[in-house]
Image (tube, helix red, strand yellow):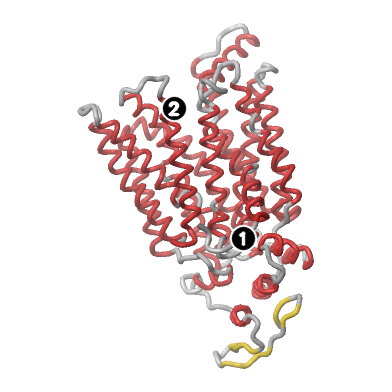
Amino acid sequence: MLPQRITACLVNAAFFGAFGSSYLYGYNLSVVNAPALYIKTFYNQTWMERYGEPIGADMVTMLWSITVSIFAIGGLLGALCVTLLTKLIGRKGTLLLNNGFAVIAALLLALGEKARSFEMLIIGRFVMGVDSGIALSALPMYLGEISPRHMRGSIGQFNSILICLGVFTGQVLGLPELLGQESRWNFLFAFLALPALLQLCVLPFLPESPRFLLMERRDEAGAEKAFRAFLGKKDVSKELEEVHAEGRAQNTLHMASVTELLLNPALRWQVITVIVTMACYQLCGLNAIWYYTNGILRDSGFAENVIPYIVLSTGGIETLAAVVSGLVIERIGRRPLLIFGFSAMAFFFGLLTVFLNFQDQYTWMPYLSFTCILAVIASFCSGPGGIPFVLTGELFEQSYRPAAFMIAGIVNWVANFAVGLLFPFMQESLQTYAFLVFLVVCVLGAVYLYFILPETKNKTFMDISQSFAKINNVPLGNKEIENELAIKAGSKEICTRYDGYHNSVTCYIRKESMGIY
C-alpha cells in the first residue's frame, strides 16, 4: 500500500497518461507475433498481384525484418523530438499531441490489407515507433513532476505496469479464438486507436505538470491549482516553495540542450548512470527470452495449439511483478530493487544456460528451463523494467530534465535496434551460450549501481543533486545551500545561512507567494 493518501486526480492522470502511452508501447512489442505468418502471406499475395510472380524467400524475410525493426527507428526519431515538444507545449500537451501518431498508425496498419499495400504496414510501424519514442520520455517526465516525492516511485511505476499490461493484452488478443486469425489480424492493429482516443477524452480535463507551469510558464496560479488537484489539499505553499528554491538554485530557467548537459561537470555521473541503466534495460536479454520461449515449450512436449496459452503466463508474471514493484518501491527504494533485479537475472541466466545444455538428456529438464524463463521475467519487472525511467526523472532538476530524457531515449532505442539486429547472429554462433552474454551485462549493471547510485526515494530533486556532488568532484554552490536550508526551515522565521568561508550567518525569511526570501 502507498504510505499516504493518494488522490483520484493523481491516479487518473497516471493511469490514463500511461494507458494512451506506455500501454501502446507494450502492446506493440507483442502484437506482431500472432499474425506474423498471415502478414508474410499478405506480402506474398500483394507481390504476386503487382509483379505476377511469387516473392522470394529472402525478400519476404527482408520485408518482415524491416517491418519489425523500423519500429525502433521510429522510436529513436520520437525520442529526438521530446525536448522540443515538452518545451513548446508542455508534458501533458506532448502526450495529447502524441495520440495523433497512434491514430494515424492504427489506420495505416489496419487498412494496409484492404489497400493491398504492404508499404502501409511498414510506414504504420514506423509511425507507431515515433509515438512510442515520444511516450517513453514524455510520460515518465510528466509522472515524476506531478507526484509528491513520497509517491514518486509508485506513480512512476504506472509506466512499467502499463507496458506489461500492454504486452499481456497483445498476447490475449492474438489468440486464435480472438483476433489471431487470418481474417481478423488487421483488427489487432485497429485496436491501437482505442487507448489513444480514450486518453484524448480524459487527459484534457486533468492538470498540466505544476513544475512546468511554475518554472517554465511562470504561471503561479496554474501551478498552485495543479498542486491542489494532485495533492488533494488547499495549502500547497511548501510545494511551491520547494519548486521556487530549485529555480533559484539553478540561477536560470533556460532549458539546457543535450550538449550543455553532457558538458556540465556537475551532472557527469548522473548522465553516465542514466546511460548505463538504459543500456542495461535493453541489453539485459529479455528480448532474447521471448525468442526462446516457444522453442523450449515445444521441447517440453506441449502441443503447438497449447503453447500460446502457456505463453500467457509470461505476460501474467510480467504484469504481477511490475505491480508488486510499484507497491514496494517506496518502502524498499530504487537502488535495492535495481541491484536485486539485475543480480537475480544474472543468476537465472546462469541456471538457464545449464538447463538448456542438458534438456536433450532429461525429459524433465525443459520444465526447469521454462521456470527459469519465468524467473528472469519476474526479476526484470521487479526493478530493471521500470525504475530506469523513474531515475531519469529524479536525477536531474527542471532545466536539465528534457535533455536527460532525450539522451535516455536515444540510448534506449539504439540499444533496442542493436539487440534486434545482432541477436540472431549471436544466437546462431553461440547457441544456448548466448545467455552468458546477458549474464555479464546484468552483473556489470548491478556492480555499477552498487558503487555509484545513491538512494533517491523520498528526496527532493535538490537533495538528489547534492548526493552526486561528491562523486562529481564539484563543490555545492552557496546559493544552493542557502535555498536548501531555507526550504527545510519550513515555516520557521529564522534559518542558518553559510557564506563562502563556512561561517554561519543568521538570515530572516518570510513566506510569500513567490517563495522564501
Please tell me how crowded label 1 is: few (under 14), some (14-19), or many (20+) other residues with Cα within 10 Å.
many
Question: Alpha-carbon distance for marks 2 and 1?
Answer: 37 Å
Residue flagged by tag 2: what amino acid is it? Tyr
Q: Left or right? Give the position of 114 relative to 368.
A: right
Task: Provide the secondary structure element on which disc 2 rests.
Answer: helix
Name above or below for residue 447 compared with residue 360: below
Q: Left or right? Give the position of 110 relative to 335.
A: right
Q: Left or right? Give the position of 457 relative to 260.
A: left
The percent position of residue 320, horizontal first and vertical second, equals: 46, 44
The percent position of residue 490, horizontal first and vertical second, equals: 63, 80
Name above or below for residue 456 compared with residue 193: below
Identify the residue at horizontal 58%, vertical 17% (top origin).
Answer: 43
Please tell me how crowded label 2 is: few (under 14), some (14-19), or many (20+) other residues with Cα within 10 Å.
few
- Total numbered badges shown on the rendered structure: 2
The residue that label 2 is drawn on is 309
Question: In this view of the protein, which residue sits in the foreground, 156 or 266?
Answer: 156
Question: Quarter of the image holding residue 225?
Answer: bottom right
Name above or below for residue 112 compared with residue 270: above
Identify the residue at horizontal 38%, vertical 35% (top origin).
Answer: 426
The residue that label 1 is drawn on is 147
Q: Earlier in the sequence, mark 2 or mark 1?
A: 1
Question: In this view of the protein, which residue sits in the foreground, 470 or 461?
Answer: 461
Numbered mark located on residue 24 in the image: none
